[in-house]
Amino acid sequence: MAEGEKKEIPPEVIERVKKLREEIEYHNYRYYVLDSPVISDAEYDALMRELRELEAKYPELITPDSPTQRVGFKPAEGFKEVPHREPMLSLDDAMEESEVIEFDKRIKRFLNLPENMPIEYTVEPKIDGVAVELVYENGLFTIGSTRGDGYVGEDVTNNLKTIKTIPLRLKRFSEDAPEIPKRIDVRGEVYLTKEEFKRLNEERIAKKELPFANPRNAAAGSLRQLDPQITAKRRLDIFCYGVGYVEGYHFKTQWEILEVLPKWGLKVNPLVKKVSNIEEAIKYHHEIEKIRDTLPYEIDGIVIKVNDLSLWEKLGTKARSPRYALAYKFQPTQATTQLVDVVFQVGRTGAVTPVAILKPVKIGGVIVERATLHNEDFIKNLDIRIGDYVLVQRAGDVIPEIVMPIKERRSGQEREIQFPTHCPICGSTLVKKPGEAIWRCPNKACYAQGVRRLLHFASRNAMNIEGLGEKVARDLIDRGMVQSPADLYYLKVEDFMKLPGFAYKKAKNLYNAIQKSKRTTLARFLYALGIRHVGEAMAQLLAEKFKSLDKLMQASMVDLASIPGIGPEAARSIVEFFKDEENRKMIERLLQAGITFEEEKPEEVPKVLEGLSFVFTGTLKNFTREEAKELVSRLGAKAMDSVSKNVNFVVVGEAPGSKYQKALSLGVKTINEEEFLKLLEQKGITMEEIKNKILKKEAKTSLF
Ligand SMILES: [Zn+2]
């Protein structure tokens, strides 16, 4: 490219930059003016990042009004404007350790320092609140303002005066406290505790108002009230972290600021620290991230600042952010995605919880596919619908939850969520105590039923999932991770790591066992479904007769009942099972998860009874009627339902019915159960074989 020749900017880049700016402007407006964002912070950051990268590549595209060139938003109407004596800049964000190391290197390059020379930093938690400036003149709090666009903020003096931890007059609280300066502009972050945030949002939801998306929005919304009375009710608090313009005192380090402010009565976060190099700052980041969930207020990262203030001047600022400080963010905890469906899960106490099935979304490195919708009131008050875009939160060990719907993104195709009137597990009518938000299944045995169903599904002769015992089944259901057995196949190793007593290896083993079970046989699968009257032998028979799940699912009562070995009750139960919408959905999800059926090697059962026909009457000790019929048919004989002259044997059990009389009158040979077994033995079929091979089921008692 010749000197001076302009680099061609592809039109799609120009278009994209324009689009990004429009989008960011809109989200700025939602965020800063309405305190009601419609995307998560992480998604906003991603848009900003993309724009910044494009502008870095094509600097000709930078305009003074680009969102990258300014911070915050101009003051909203209704507030008096307050210019900041020194601009309140915002900080560059880093997500990755490599970016933090680059920040340190850049500083050294800029200052012409050797690369291995350590730089001292201060580190502090980055509070998820709203930045303010407090002006003290001769110790008296005179003006308080928001950051605004960094140069001009909103006058919220009276609102700030309602915060009890903001001193109206600075005092020297200790012997070694410096004299109060003539003027000092103190910077801090106004925030709400998690508890207060929760209380505030519960109040709003109860009033059918949308909750605040995060504590920052709640703090900003509470502070930016035209009526200070409202602010006063919100129990806001503050952490001070820096100074702007100062007259009458000279701070030498950031650490000195953090040490002196409390001596004048200003509140500083107790976790602030001085570190001697960037590696220690990174270590601090990891330490704070670990205790993040235990803190009473929300933080979203740490702030790293060069300690020596004389270096700040040398380093200076870029367009909108200083070179001497960096926000090193934690993994985001929120994202927006689409609500695809809602299922209802029954817990140990019978509580029915609506669970959102989400279009999978990554939050903090983990894919989230399900989130709690809490209860019916939550859904109704916020008017959450299937198809809605929703803000989802996943913080620490807590089950992911829906924060709110984003109604601005509705298409009109959304559907209302129907709360069930009956228990999804046992069918009992749900009950709700007056004043409670939670519907419960009154059937005490119901939860156990869910656990049993899962255990049956995973059992050795069904899907054969090793490591899924009773304790695990309970924990999975308790935590809402599994409602229907199909859910098992959508869990990942990291999901199992949330179970008590599960480290990586155990979680991986269980995950592998579940994956392995996907290759199964139709018979095992049918047995695992837990259809009433369908035991292992019946499942085997169905698999042999129908050979495909599809065909079985379409079979009618008549189709089924005409198969020897399947009585009318079993036939009805099978048809009803496959007609049920929930069951069909479960099967679909199982198949979608990748369950495949292999041809089972045909058991080599000699057809020793070929050409014979049997009728059974009365109660047998070793078999049910169905099993006995199945046994003889597998051995090549015909199992008949009624006695005729053509029948070879009528096997007579306890309390035989009219068939016995008929056999006698027709002169058909009758034998008892012992004789029947002896007959089989003579043909080389032992009880052992019947149990383990032919019927593959424990006999109730053994004669041998
Ligand atoms: Zn129930």
Image: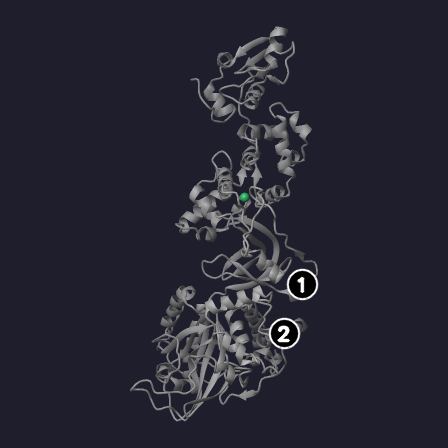
Which of the 4 image quadrants contains residue 424?
top right
Q: Which residue is mark 1?
A: 410
Q: Which residue is mark 2?
A: 26
Q: Amino acid at mark 1?
A: Arg
Upstream in sequence: badge 1 or badge 2? 2
Residue displayed at 68% across by 28% down:
558
Give the image location of residue 525, x and y in percent. Answer: 55, 36
Residue at the farthest right position: 412
Q: Residues within 10 Å of mark 2 (few under 14, many from 20)?
A: few
Q: Is 94 rendered above or below residue 139?
A: above
Give the image location of residue 441, x and y in percent. Answer: 54, 46
On the question of residue 95 being in view, the answer is no
Give the image location of residue 358, x and y in percent. Answer: 58, 56
Classify the position of the C terminus by image quarter: top left
Mark 1 within 8 Å of ligand 1, using the beta carbon:
no
Q: Nearer the viewer, residue 532 or 426?
A: 426
Classify the position of the N terminus by image quarter: bottom right
Ligand 1's quadrant: top right
Give the image location of residue 587, x and y in percent. Answer: 60, 42
Q: Is residue 409 left or right of residue 704?
A: right
Residue at the farthest front position: 434
Q: Nearer the viewer, mark 1 or mark 2?
A: 1
